[in-house]
Amino acid sequence: MDQTLRSRTSMGRLDHYYYIMRTTIFAYVALAAIIGFGAQGISLVLIVLVIATAAYGILAGSTALADVANLRDDMDEDMAASNFGKGVKSHNLKGLILTSNVLLGLIGLSELIAIVF
């Protein structure tokens, strides 16, 4: 895989991650509005929607970031030795994946608590 294709693929997967996060946060905000302004009580439909939103954000976001990490690890030696390559290698993508998953999970959990209680 040449450098141009690797860069284009990496940028595409990062854009995909941002789209996933934007969609997930928008869905969470819409569900929060429904929970806040809707009828009180437990709604199985809302519970399923919150769980589906959390699963979508966590699974799809993790996959996109894992692909970026794999592309980063496939850098050739010349690129890895450059200042840009060193900077890219120094980013903690596993930490970003973990943080993203935990935050999306906590938002989902808080919405589930708001539905049930």
Image (cartoon, helix red, strand yellow):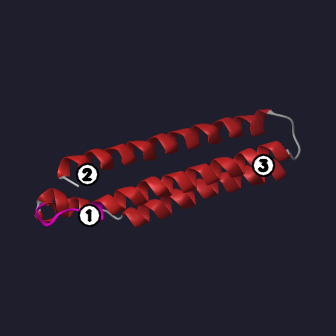
Name above or below for residue 39 compared with residue 59. above
Which residues, given as a range, are shown in magenta?
A: 72-78
The amino acid marked with disc number 2 is Arg
Say what secondary structure mark 1 lies in: loop
Say what secondary structure mark 3 lies in: helix
Q: Position of residue 16 (x, y in %)?
A: 43, 43
- Whether the residues at callouts 3 and 2 have beta carbons within 8 Å, the answer is no
- Whether the residues at callouts 1 and 2 have beta carbons within 8 Å, the answer is yes
Whether residue 32 sits left or right of residue 18 in the image: it is right
The residue lying toward the viewer, choosing from 75 and 24, is 75
Residue lying furthest front:
1
Q: Position of residue 62 (x, y in %)?
A: 49, 57
The amino acid marked with disc number 1 is Asp
Reading the chain from its start, which is encountered first: label 1 or label 2? 2
Q: CA distance from mark 1 to mark 2?
A: 9 Å
Residue to which mark 1 is pinned: 74
What residue appears at the point 28 percent right and 60 percent down from the top-left corner?
Answer: 72
The amino acid marked with disc number 3 is Ile
Reading the chain from its start, which is encountered first: label 3 or label 2? 2
Residue to which mark 3 is pinned: 47
Whether residue 22 sits left or right of residue 27 in the image: it is left
Picture quarter with the N terminus: bottom left
Residue to which mark 2 is pinned: 6
Numbered disc total = 3
